[in-house]
Image (tube, rainbow, N blue to C red):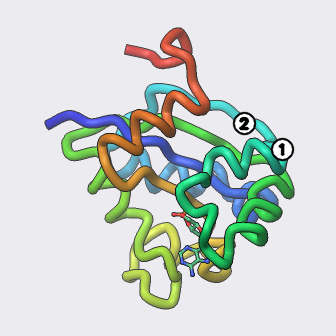
Amino acid sequence: MTQRTLSIIKPDAVQRNLQGAIMKMIQDSGLKIVAMKMLRLSKDEARGFYDVHKDRPFFDSLTDYMSSGPIVVSILEGENGIDKYREIMGATNPENAQEGTIRKAYALDIEKNSVHGSDAPETAQVEMAYFFSKMEMVG
Ligand code: CMP
């Protein structure tokens, strides 16, 4: 089944100029980019995006970090796109990420883990709508 998922290249990766390298890994996997832009979240916008984590101990640190610099948000499309992107990202904690994954290659730690991807169809819908209007989604 063809699925769309939201991807974020996080501040730690953009700051190290890794957007191109990460996009290449994404494109080499066969996933297609159907929307893309660069922006910087305010602290409140980061809180809104990560609302499901608001009761977690890392919420304040996470939202500080996610609003600390520019990010690149995109919508990726492909066969089983949600799980496929999660596979190429690797585990949330880079210490557990497999060889060949984005997080194994670039993540700094469990927080500054370079990329985000939606975890299910319902969250993908909410996350895509958080950043993109229908008009900005190609195809
Ligand atoms: P992400 O996939 O964007 O989802 C939530 C984010 O919280 C996660 O990646 C990390 O950037 C961050 N985070 C920080 N600490 C933890 C933790 N202990 N468990 C899960 N996520 C964490």
Residue under circle 2?
38
Any mark on residue 77, and which? none
Mark 2 secondary-structure assignment: strand
In the rendered image, residue 114, in percent from the top left (x then y), is placed at: 62, 65
| Residue sticking out furthest to the front | 55
Q: Amino acid at mark 1?
A: Ser
Residue under circle 1?
42
- Image height of 136 relative to 20, above or below: above
Q: Quadrant of residue 85?
A: bottom left
| Residue sticking out furthest to the bottom | 95
Mark 1 secondary-structure assignment: loop
Residue under the image location 58 percent in, 31 percent down: 36
In the rendered image, residue 124, in percent from the top left (x then y), is placed at: 40, 41
Q: For the residues marked 1 and 2, what is the alpha-carbon distance in whole angstroms? A: 13 Å
Q: Is residue 10 left or right of residue 61?
A: left
In the rendered image, residue 130, in percent from the top left (x then y), is placed at: 58, 32
In this rendered view, identify the residue nearer to me: 55 or 27.
55
| Residue sticking out furthest to the left | 1
In the rendered image, residue 45, in percent from the top left (x then y), is placed at: 74, 42
Q: Amino acid at mark 2?
A: Met
